Amino acid sequence: MILLDYRDKRPIYEQVVEKLERLIVSGGLEPLTKMPSVRSLAMELSVNPNTVQRAYAQLEQDGYLYTVSGRGSFVTAENEWRENKQGKVLREWRNITLQAREAGLSQERLGEELQKIYTACEENLQEPGGQYD
């Protein structure tokens, strides 16, 4: 389910967050699915339970999971996490746009570059196994 790269400089919990987020977004973990317990996932990944707990807390903060006291963690309904993800992307886009403006890039140039990136993403995603990073 999740493969960790111990040579990656990022903390393990960030890798767990990234892998689980990708599983949720891709449909590998369907909405309202019960997540493995912290202990069982920690044992499966051979990591400290605190690492998994921290990852679950981050995913809950990002809107991908919700917790029911005494029952565990569950994948949030798609429309909820998708809205959170879109909001986060738009906030990042605003920040980048401000930086680009401060660097002297015109609105026209930004529009052209955005179109190029968007087109490249669509073309790459249409290829078998293609993904744009």
Image (tube, grey):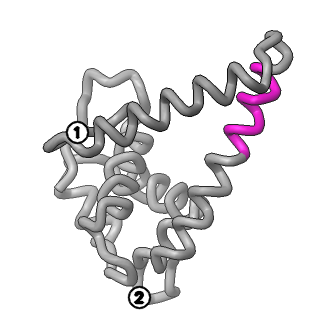
Which residue range is magenta in the image? 91-100
124 displayed left or right of 68: left
Rendered location of residue 117, percent (x, y): 49, 30
Q: Position of residue 97 (x, y in %)?
A: 75, 29
Compare residues 35 and 22 and report the one nearer the observer.
Answer: 22
Q: Please identify the quarter of the rendering in which residue 3 is found.
A: top left
Instruction: Give the residue at the far top of this rendering.
Output: 103
Spot occupied by residue 108 in the image (x, y as percentages of width and height): 74, 24
Kindly report which numbered mark, 2 or 1, lies closer to the viewer in this rendering.
1
Disc 1 target residue: 130
- Tell me, yes or no, whether the highlighted magenta stretch contains residue 98: yes
Q: Amino acid at mark 1?
A: Gly
Location of the C terminus (image quadrant): top left
Classify residue 133 as left or right of residue 124.
right
How packed mark 1 is, by other alpha carbons closer than 10 Å (few <14, some 14-19, many 20 or more), is few
Q: Residue at x 39, y 46 (%)?
A: 18
Predominant secondary structure, magenta span: helix
Tag 1 or tag 2, which sits nearer the N-term? Answer: 2
Q: Is residue 130 magenta?
A: no
Tell me the distance, in whole angstroms, between the alpha carbons under discs 2 and 1: 38 Å
Residue found farthest to the right: 102
Looking at the rendered structure, the secondary structure element under dot 2 is loop
Query: Going by the image, does 11 lie left or right of 46?
Result: right
Work out whether 79 lies above or below 28.
Answer: below
Q: Residue at x 69, y 38 (%)?
A: 93
State the quadrant of the N terminus: bottom left
Q: Which residue is mark 2?
A: 71
